[in-house]
Amino acid sequence: MQLDRSQEDSAATVRILKQMNRSVNWLIIDHYEIDRDWESILKPYVKYIMVIDDLANRSHLCDLLLDQNLHADAENRYRELVPLHCKRLIGPRYLLLSPSFYSLKGKLSRRQGRLENLLVFFGGSDPTNETVKALKALSELDVVPSRTTVIIGSANPNRGYIRELCGQMDKVRLHVQVDNMAEHIAQADFALGAGGVAMWERCFLGLPSAITIVADNQKASVDAAEKYGAVWSLGGHDQVNPGTYRKIVERAMSLPDERRMMNGKALELFERSSHPIVLDEILASEES
């Protein structure tokens, strides 16, 4: 955030806090351009500050820091960037999820290796148009899954063309702007998708998946998840074409044992995550 914009924004936030005319326990910040300077201006007006980050590229003045991604050196990742008293919650076990994910988690059975339902979801807007690439790949397959579930957001600029492509394939069903993503993930056997939070949502419910990196800040977490054995990485979106997706679906269909292994490794990342752990940590911070 440029200096003048930062000052203007922090001053506006202070005005809002003053207008509330009551004490504020927690200020939660989720913005890549906000740092210690902005936070130091707001600190006198709130009891605690929580920061959500995954870049570890700037200092913070906060009491709680959340980074939901998998990192090889998690213990030292923010050591020099936050105050000594700051509690650091690092790793996918602290993933922020809707209640529907937790309720389904306890009902899941281990996937047995059959690939009958393929899930395709590359985010609400899918800025690199991966959905179209994937659909073209499916049209080239000799053997296709019994069902393919395609999900896009209403903001997808190619939704008209995507609807047309889906309409040309009998075993493909399109859903626009769903509010039951956890159910779709739980019902699928394999997924094509992007990195980011959506990747961790799939891992939380043990769904094996092939990941395309559609933003620079996804690369480290996708690489770490692949190294752990929880996903297959296809690399950056500029390296991926319909042929890439065709080959990875064929691989997934022919290697049920590898998909079962991914299922196990993905679930292993969240063994102790049966409820919203972050809320527990927030409440514990207030008591300490």
Image (tube, grey):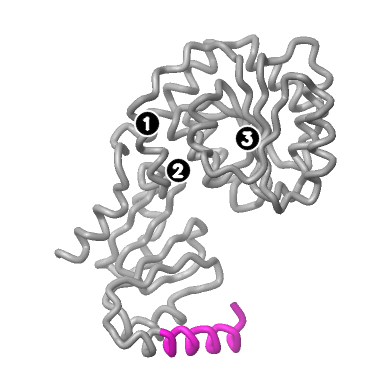
Q: Magenta segment, principal secondary structure?
A: helix
Question: Which mark is first along the chain, 3 or 2?
Answer: 2
| Residue drawn at x 36%, y 38% as measured from the top left | 102
The kind of residue on which mark 3 rests is Ile
| Residue on which disc 2 sits | 70
Q: Please rate how many residues cluster around mark 2, counting C-alpha atoms within 10 Å: few if below 14, some from 14 to 19, many from 20.
A: many
The kind of residue on which mark 1 rests is Lys
Q: Please rate how many residues cluster around mark 1, counting C-alpha atoms within 10 Å: few if below 14, some from 14 to 19, many from 20.
A: some
Q: Distance of mark 2 from mark 3, alpha carbons?
A: 15 Å
Q: Distance of mark 1 from mark 2, alpha carbons?
A: 20 Å
Whether pointer 2 and pointer 3 mark residues with C-beta atoms closer than 8 Å, the reply is no
Q: Which residues are magenta?
A: 1-16
Q: Quadrant of the N terminus?
A: bottom right
| Residue on which disc 3 sits | 211
Q: Residue furthest left?
A: 288
Answer above or below: position of 3 versus 223. Answer: below
| Residue on which disc 1 sits | 105
- Secondary structure at badge 1 equals helix
Question: Which mark is first along the chain, 2 or 1?
Answer: 2
Image coordinates for residue 164, horizontal then vertical, percent = 84, 35
Give the label on residue 116, or none. Answer: none
